[in-house]
Image: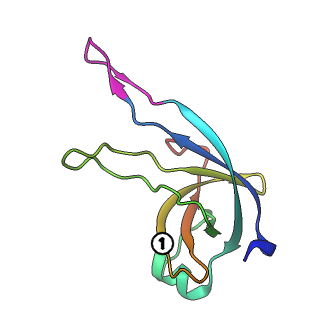
Amino acid sequence: MRGFRQHITVERTAAGTIDDNGRYIKGTVTTMDIMASVQPLGSQERYTLLGPEGARNTAYVKIYTDAPLRPQSAASGEGEATKADIISYDGRRYMVIQCDAYQSHVISHYRAYAKEVLVDDDS
């Protein structure tokens, strides 16, 4: 799978904190470079992720990589909430919405799905 991969930039935001006055301080954003294959969704994936109505004016992609990507998660128990990773590809920014591990020890990898970040989205 390495032959089809290219360099992709990932933005990862650390968890925010609460200062002594009770105000929220956003986490810092770091960037990292990964090797990944970015592909359009297949018709069945599009139907499964978006439903029969689809999503108008929004692009979705799937990403194959050796690096685990983080979707957004809510705080639970002792765990902290995390912001989704943002990837830059082909002049657009995409927010990771799901990442599944395929760790078969033959061709171990991660498959992630991402949604285009639009101008009016809160990112």
Name the outermost residue toward the top.
21
Name the outermost residue toward the bottom.
44
Does residue 11 appear in this view?
A: yes
Name the outermost residue toward the front.
105
Task: Answer left or right for 52 relative to 60.
Answer: left
**In the image, is residue 113 above or below residue 86?**
below
Residue located at (44% from left, 28% from top)? 26
Does residue 51 appear in this view?
A: no
Task: Answer left or right for 22 relative to 4.
Answer: left
> Magenta stretch: residue 24 in it?
yes
Q: Quadrant of the N terminus?
A: bottom right
Task: Answer left or right for 19 relative to 47.
Answer: left
Q: Amino acid at mark 1?
A: Ala
**What residue would you read off at disc 1?**
101
Q: Position of residue 104 (x, y in %)?
A: 51, 82
Give the prevailing secondary structure in the magenta stretch: loop
Circle 1 — which element?
Answer: strand
**In the image, is residue 35 above or below residue 46?**
above
> Magenta stretch: residue 54 in it?
no
Q: Which residues are magenta?
A: 17-27
Tell me the quarter of the picture where residue 21 sits.
Answer: top left
Q: Position of residue 10 (x, y in %)?
A: 63, 49
Q: How many marks do you count on the picture?
A: 1
Residue located at (39% from left, 45% from top)? 82
**In the image, is residue 11 above or below residue 25?**
below
Q: Position of residue 29 (x, y in %)?
A: 56, 34
Q: Residues within 10 Å of mark 1 (few under 14, many from 20)?
A: some
